[in-house]
Image: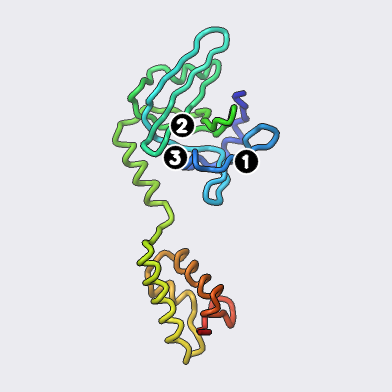
Amino acid sequence: MSGEIGESQFKRWIAYKMRAGDILAGKPVVAEEKLQHLEINGREINRVNVIANIVEKYVQEGEKKFGSLTLDDGSGQIRLKFFGEDVEKMSGLNQGDTVLCIGMLRTWNNELYVTPEILKKKEPAFLLVRKLEIEADAPKTLAREEIAELKDKILKMVKGAEEGGGIDIDKIIMELHEPPEIINSEIKKLLEDGVAYEPRPGKLRYLG
């Protein structure tokens, strides 16, 4: 059930900094009842790096040692599971503590959980630091009004360049100072709507 994996395999998988809610919103890819990876925003994720507060601690003593910590970082809750001698990793940690966990994603009975490799107690301030880190790395988005304004600007630039035989997409991106992925998305819509066309890759002309 614990699905042990050799150390050499751990090194090939990046431990992505993630929030619990984003992990739970991902799409588990399972083959033969075993989790292959989690799909999140086009990435295949096997290992995660989470900072969260412990909201529940459970230890089962006896022949089959088992323990779990439920973590909450404000975006959702996810469980860490410990088997056998690994239960010792939980010692010294209690409800209310803030921890950093790096571990492998697993599934069991339709529950997505983490098998920890590294577990460290942290100051509560690290929870906010991690939230800001993830927000800074997230793809930028614009409000609907800003998108409409951006589309008008792109169209105006395309129209204004007609006499010169069109405009390079790179020039639009450089002059508008908005996230390139959003500009490219709006250009794609103009092409699909038949408002503009590409006489050659990377150049736009107005079609009307």
- Tell me where residue 105 sits by quadrant: top right
Callout 2–callout 3 Cβ contact below 8 Å = no
Circle nearer the N terminus (1, 2): 1
- In terms of depth relative to the viewer, which is nearer, 190 or 126? 190
Circle nearer the N terminus (1, 3): 3
**What is the residue that sits farthest to the bottom in this orientation?**
163
- In terms of depth relative to the viewer, which is nearer, 14 or 73? 73
Q: How many marks?
A: 3
Circle 2 Cα neighbour tier, 10 Å, few/some/many (<14 / 14–19 / ≥20): many
Circle nearer the N terminus (2, 3): 3
- In terms of depth relative to the viewer, which is nearer, 181 or 144? 144
Secondary structure state at the residue bearing disc 3: helix
Circle 3 Cα neighbour tier, 10 Å, few/some/many (<14 / 14–19 / ≥20): some
Amino acid on which the number 1 mark rests in the picture:
Val
Q: Position of residue 14 (x, y in %)?
A: 53, 42
Q: Distance of mark 1 from mark 2, alpha carbons? A: 18 Å
Residue designated by label 2: 78
- Tell me where residue 72 sits by quadrant: top left
What residue lies at 55% left-to-right and 78% top-to-bottom?
A: 194
Q: Distance of mark 1 from mark 3, alpha carbons? A: 18 Å
Residue designated by label 3: 21
Rendered view: 73 above or below 203: above
Rendered view: 143 above or below 102: below
Q: Position of residue 169 (x, y in %)?
A: 49, 75
What residue lies at 51% left-to-right and 89% top-to-bottom?
A: 165
Residue designated by label 1: 29
**Residue 191: numbered disc:** none
Q: Position of residue 1 (x, y in %)?
A: 62, 23
What residue lies at 43% left-to-right and 72% top-to-bottom?
A: 173
Amino acid on which the number 2 mark rests in the picture:
Ile
